[in-house]
């Protein structure tokens, strides 16, 4: 079995996907892992063991300028959730690398007639992932109206639509509720439109004060979500049915700062706080190399 499926962009004219790079994407099988006796939503301390994982893709954001176009594309426009921001493409005011950090900046600048602007970086058509550990180290902005997120969507969304494609929310945060972090899973059977989405939050964290690690460990039979070394959500595969588990197929990453919208804007937008910066130290994807 291929542990971590990473599909390179089909228009990779530089031939950068070498035989060695291809080898890095395969290895020991991601065998189903039992978690007997553990509650799905009970916070549990689980120390990350770097020796058990191998880094296979990532971005350290160590070169100033625009995000690496070989790794990231953009969504553009008003996309979803009745959000207030217009997502721009390759506009440094909204997305840039600066001082070893990716800065996604939401602005109230009336650019081209759009009151609020921001950015959403995606790996669609460049890199797709199936299983493994996906993590980000980031500092979220806060204040009413902010809604930063790091998440995935099924690569087949164009064919089957949402939520059948599946969605994995590794980091969600809403500024009107500033001391909680959230993780959520959406699929055809369980999603917020039906009011039965599967997720959990971890209160008392004050994530806007500093950088923190947000991660998912994605296995063939479950997903485990982490805030630093606290596991606070486990979503288990119920059946071999894509309505509850559309997660045996490639997903792409999304990294965005939304303003307002169906969740982030339920208590309005505090316009006195702009601009907002979502700062990202790194994004990393690992495959498992050692079983417990």
Image (spheres, helix red, strand yellow):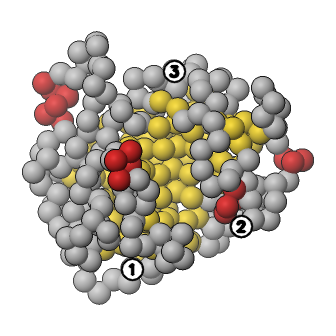
Q: Where is residue 259 in the image (x, y as percent from the top left)?
A: 71, 49
Q: Is residue 110 left or right of residue 186?
A: right
Is 44 left, or right, of 209 in this rendering? left
Distance in Å between CA atoms under marks 2 and 1: 23 Å
* Residue wearing tag 1: 40
Depth order, front residue of 255/47: 255
What residue does disc 2 label? 177
Is there any visible trace of residue 81 in the rendered image?
yes
Say which element carries label 3: loop
Residue at image point 59% right, 23% down: 90
**Residue 224 in the figure: left or right of residue 132:** right
Query: Which residue appears farthest toward the top when viewing the image?
Result: 14
For label 3, the residue is 63
Image location of residue 9, percent across then percent down: 31, 27
User: Which is nearer the eye, 121 or 79?
Assistant: 79
Say few, some or many: other residues with alpha carbon within 10 Å of mark 1 (under 14 / 14 to 19 / 20 or more). Answer: some
On screen, residue 101 above or below 17: below
């Amino acid at each position: 079995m291929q542990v971590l499926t990473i599909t390179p962009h089909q228009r990779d004219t530089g031939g950068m996907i070498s035989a060695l790079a291809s080898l890095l994407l395969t290895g020991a099988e991601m065998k189903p892992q039992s978690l007997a006796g553990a509650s799905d939503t009970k916070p549990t301390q689980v120390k990350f063991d770097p020796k058990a994982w191998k880094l296979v893709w990532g971005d350290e954001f160590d070169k100033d300028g625009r995000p690496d176009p070989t790794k990231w594309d953009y969504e553009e426009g008003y996309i979803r959730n009745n959000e207030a921001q217009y997502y721009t493409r390759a506009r440094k005011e909204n997305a840039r690398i600066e001082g070893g950090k990716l800065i996604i900046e939401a602005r109230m600048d009336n650019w081209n007639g759009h009151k609020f602007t921001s950015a959403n970086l995606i790996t669609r058509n460049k890199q797709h992932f199936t299983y493994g550990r996906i993590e980000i180290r980031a500092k979220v902005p806060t204040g009413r109206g902010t809604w930063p997120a790091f998440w995935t969507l099924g690569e087949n969304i164009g064919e089957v639509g949402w939520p059948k494609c599946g969605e994995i929310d590794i980091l969600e945060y809403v500024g009107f509720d500033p001391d909680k972090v959230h993780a959520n899973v959406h699929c055809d059977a369980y999603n917020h439109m039906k009011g039965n989405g599967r997720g959990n939050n971890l209160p008392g964290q004050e994530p806007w004060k500093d950088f923190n690690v947000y991660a998912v460990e994605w296995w063939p039979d479950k997903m485990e979500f982490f805030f630093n070394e606290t596991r606070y959500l486990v979503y288990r595969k119920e059946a071999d049915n894509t309505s509850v588990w559309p997660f045996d197929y490639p997903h792409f990453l999304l990294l965005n700062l939304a303003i307002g919208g169906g969740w982030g804007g339920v208590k309005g937008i505090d316009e006195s706080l702009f601009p907002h910066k979502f700062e990202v130290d790194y994004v990393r994807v690992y495959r498992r190399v050692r079983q417990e």
